[in-house]
Amino acid sequence: QVQYAEPGGGLAQAGGSLKLSCVVSGSYHNLGAMAWYRQVTEKQRRLVARIQSKVGANFADSVKGRFAISRDNSKNMLYLQMDSLKNENTCVYYCKACPAVRIGSWSSYWGQGTQVTVSS
């Protein structure tokens, strides 16, 4: 289960900042990879940023240098710091988690999505 721990998204001016957060409920052997996606079409979501222990983080080219992804494993939390926002960043964003409840047993969870609107 993935839920937004705090009201996420919202409205920001171009050049401003927003921070998204979500939490994965339950206790897991390994939190695995966690990521943020954006809705690009009615049927397609595209990766924005991903973070994985011992692997590090990777970002879509369009947000490199502006967005930062982080996690707090002790709280099962995932964050996306969005700086220098542009109008093109307006979208619905989704939190995704792929934890393992036990060794060899992996799951995949999606958040419900949160709207980010950037105005000029």
Image (cartoon, rainbow, N blue to C red):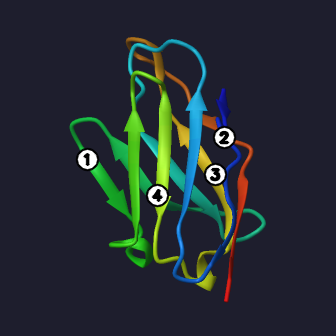
Q: Seen in the image, is 66 located left or right of residue 76?
A: left
The amino acid beneath tag 4 is Gln
Q: Secondary structure at mark 3?
A: strand
For the C terminus, the image quarter is: bottom right
The amino acid beneath tag 3 is Tyr
Marks 1 and 4 close (CB-CB < 8 Å)? no
| Residue 88 x, y percent position in the rendering | 61, 82
What residue is shown with label 4? 81
Compared with 115, 83 (above or below) is: below
| Residue 117 x, y percent position in the rendering | 71, 72
What residue is shown with label 3? 94
Q: Earlier in the sequence, mark 2 or mark 4?
A: 2
Nearer the viewer's eye, disc 1 or disc 2? Answer: 2
Q: Earlier in the sequence, mark 1 or mark 2?
A: 2
**Real-space Cα distance between discs 2 and 4?**
14 Å
Give the class, few, some or many, for how many residues have Cα within 10 Å of label 3's Cα (few <14, many ≥20): many
What residue is shown with label 1? 56
Nearer the viewer's eye, disc 3 or disc 4? Answer: 4
The amino acid beneath tag 2 is Glu
Marks 1 and 3 close (CB-CB < 8 Å)? no
The amino acid beneath tag 1 is Gly
Q: Nearer the viewer, residue 10 or 70?
A: 10
For the N terminus, the image quarter is: top right
**Real-space Cα distance between discs 1 and 3?**
20 Å
Q: Secondary structure at mark 4?
A: strand
| Residue 76 x, y percent position in the rendering | 48, 26
Give the class, few, some or many, for how many residues have Cα within 10 Å of label 1's Cα (few <14, many ≥20): few
Label at residue 6 = 2
